[in-house]
Amino acid sequence: MGFSKWIGATIGWSFGGPIGAIIGMALGSVLDSSTKGGTVYTQSQTATRSGDFEVSLLVLASIVIKADGKQDQRELDFVRAQFVQMYGKERANKAFRLFKEISKQPHISTRQVCLQIRQMMDHASRLQLLHFLFGIAKADGHVADAEINVIGLIASYLGVNARDFESIKAMFYKSGESAYKILEIDSNATPTEIKKAYRKMAKKYHPDKVLHLGKEHQKGAEEKFRKVQEAYEHLQKEKQF
């Protein structure tokens, strides 16, 4: 499948608005000969496709990677490896090709991009986006404050509250209170409150919440779900209940 046909077949709502403009600029550098006839793709559906999620990841990843003023090869390798794992080598090659072109664009409005995603994408999928972005920030072994700050800014624009943000962040950056933060409770929580929080978070992060994104995104969802289980088991041992 040619590059342009891949784009047309997988992208729905993200082919319009601010994200569509960014894609359009990037495509000007990478479109193959199949678009020379003037093909224009129009999408009327509003449901988030796997491709919409994919492009959203690409745009937001480019913002995070440039947050500390440099592009570390380990971060780029992480993005590529994740895409190979999710989509297979052929599709990942196309996605990474687009990603490199997006990353070259000097002016991307984080706010406009995030507001489009917030309007069109459900909450569970937006949480999955943040999970991926934190993985990128940690990929080079050093987490710059600028990277954390920009992910926090992205979260706020996406309509993700502070507790959800800290919950996902705690899955990547361990501290004495990580388990509590993952379950979104205070350190003085009782066993009853911990059990209640576990049930709530297990439901929030259940992989079925993002089934509509396709099986390629289930691994990341399963990882979040596993972290919730690990946090609960840790507190069971700590509180001895």
Image (tube, grey):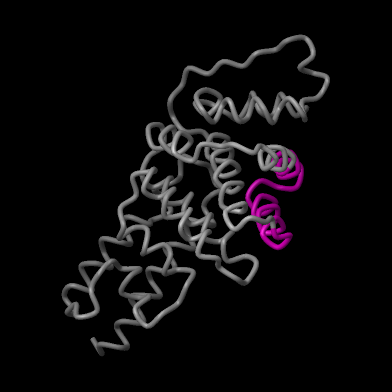
Give the quarter of the figure containing the C terminus: bottom left
- Residue located farthest toward the top when viewing the structure as drawn: 37
Q: Quadrant of the N terminus?
A: top right
Q: Is 169 left, or right, of 94 in this rendering?
A: left
Residue 5, quarter of the rendered image:
top right
Residue at point 53%, 26% (across, down): 12
Image coordinates for residue 147, horizontal then vertical, percent? 53, 59
Task: Please tell me in which quadrant of the rendered image residue 227 appears.
Answer: bottom left
193 left or right of 10 in image: left
Residue drawn 46% across the image and 51% down it: 128
Q: Residue at x 72, y 58 (%)?
A: 77
Is 90 a magenta residue? yes
Magenta: main secondary structure: helix
In the image, the segment drawn in magenta is: 72-96
In the rendered image, residue 45, in percent from the top left (x then y), is placed at 46, 21
> Residue 102's x, y, as percent?
66, 38
Q: Which residue lies most toward the right here?
A: 33
Position above or below: 136 against 60: below
Residue situated in front as seen by the camera: 203 or 63: 63
Place residue 167 in its image quadrant.
Answer: bottom left
